[in-house]
Amino acid sequence: MDTNPKDPAQASGRPAAKRLKASHWFWGTIAVLLMITLALHFAARLQLGKQRAEGEGEAASQTAAEAEAKATQVEHWFAMAGKEAAKVRAEIDPMLDKAYAPVYAGIPAYMDFHYSLKGEWLELGAAAIGEISSGLDKYMFAGLDKRLDSVAADLGREFDQRYLGVVDRAMAGLPGGAEALGPVVAGALKDSKSRITKTGGMVALEAVALKGMTKVFATKLGVKLAAKVAAKTGTKWAATLVGGGTGAAVCSWTGPGAAACGLIGAGIAWVGTDVAMIKLEDYLKRDDFEKELRALIDEHKAETRKVLEAMLAERGKERGSAAKVAVGEVALSELADADRQLACKTAGSLLVHYTGMRDNLQARSPAQVAALEQGLRAQARDHLLAPWVEGMEQAIPADPDQLRPQVVGSITVTVEVPPGLREEQEAWGKLTLGTEEIVFDWAAANTAGGYVLHAGAGEATRIAPSVRVALELVQDRGWKHRNRTFTGSASINVFSTLAEGSGLAPRVEIRLPTKPEGDNTAGPTAIIALSLSGVMLPERALPDFCTP
């Protein structure tokens, strides 16, 4: 029997075809499942990345919000502290009343001294050596300087105690204290308190200011006393001469003893006249002099009050600056890098504006200065930038006149005269810049028939941004003809005449057409060359947190 198949296909039969189809399905399924798995992994990774980014964004946003909330809370504490400390001003008047009480109480004793024979002679002697106010010091002003120093020191100490007391109570009222806000906040508050403690005393500054005021006051009173003493002395001499003449007549009978009798008589006449005049002046003028004395003391007391108020205001300003630094440190502590970079970008833009103004007179126009100040004000409430903004604002002069251009050095006027108006003679001119007048000496005509006039500006003269420029030019025409006068004027915007980036000492040229006086025809054209300058402004830099 033949066992070998003749057809291989028949040998394999249908089962072989089925096995091939099954293999395809098997591997196809594996491939599909792999692709699905890979797609799911990719989608999962994408979703996880998105969730992670959202989570980080939410965390960063939450962190920035927390930092802002902490900064706002600390800022509120310092604001309340400043308001509480400012109430110390109400204690100035009671303290001054107490300090000046011995001065007012000493007035009657001084008046008795002033209107006595002893006081008369002592004040006369003191006036001779320039110490006319010694009686005032003894009876009225003894110890006033020390009492005022004590007032200043007590006010400063009370100011800081109130200020720090509010901050301490606010921290104590927070569960966990300042440490609950984090180490950065606690450290910032500690540093701020340390700065306040180190600048605690106003004594040195107040002592100088108040003692200076007392010295001026004593000098003012001394001048009045010296005038009174001089007036009384002149009157006394006249009265004594009359009395001395009478005494000499009385003593003439004594013969050899006439000299001694005359001396004694003159002394009696002098003292008697002195006593009589003192009593008369006491009766007639005491009340008026006492009123005048009290008015001067009231004036000195009021001036002292102003000094103390100004010192407390400056103290509050210093504390406010320290508070801004502390708040800025809190805001920076947990700030996202993107927010820090944004703040630095804002500061950089403002700094570029300021640097341009610092280095170039052309950038100091009122409009540009106002734009910078507005930009700074817009960032003044930013916790991070507030300390830096304060420093920038302090760099800009409070008085706008300080930013005005100054005319310095020589001024030159070049006059281009048309052919029909030329004369081979001299010319003279007067230039008006706003309210300032500059006169030019006579100058001979040049080879082109024109003139070049020179003058010095004298002291540096500030001119307004928009200034009226006027020129009067007088041309000599010889003895046969009357002089010819040309005039011209215009309002000039000084800043518009300056080139961008021209620096702090630019030289500007102003072309000014003129007309003959009484005639509407064209006259010479004057080219006015001015040298300008501006005040130096302090250098400023980016905030420290912007430095790499």
Image: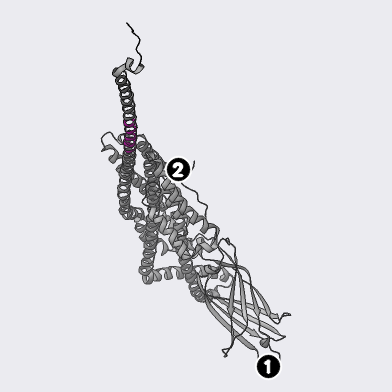
Residue 248, horizontal then vertical, whole percent = 54, 75
Residue range (magenta): 39-55
**In the depicted view, which residue is nearer to us: 257 or 462?**
462
Which label's residue is closer to the chain start, 2 or 1? Answer: 1
**In the depicted view, which residue is nearer to us: 381 or 99?**
381
Binning the other alpha carbons within 10 Å of mark 2 as few (below 14), some (14 to 19) or many (20 upward) gives some
Is 76 contained in the magenta span? Answer: no
Disc 2 is placed on an element classified as helix
Residue at 66 percent of width and 85 percent of height: 475
Horizontally, residue 105 falls left or right of residue 464, namely left
Find disc 1 in the rendering and name its residue.
Answer: 481
**Residue 478 shows up from this direction:** yes
**In the depicted view, which residue is nearer to us: 288 or 150?**
150
* Residue furthest top as drawn: 1
Find disc 2 in the rendering and name its residue.
Answer: 545
**In the depicted view, which residue is nearer to us: 31 or 245?**
31
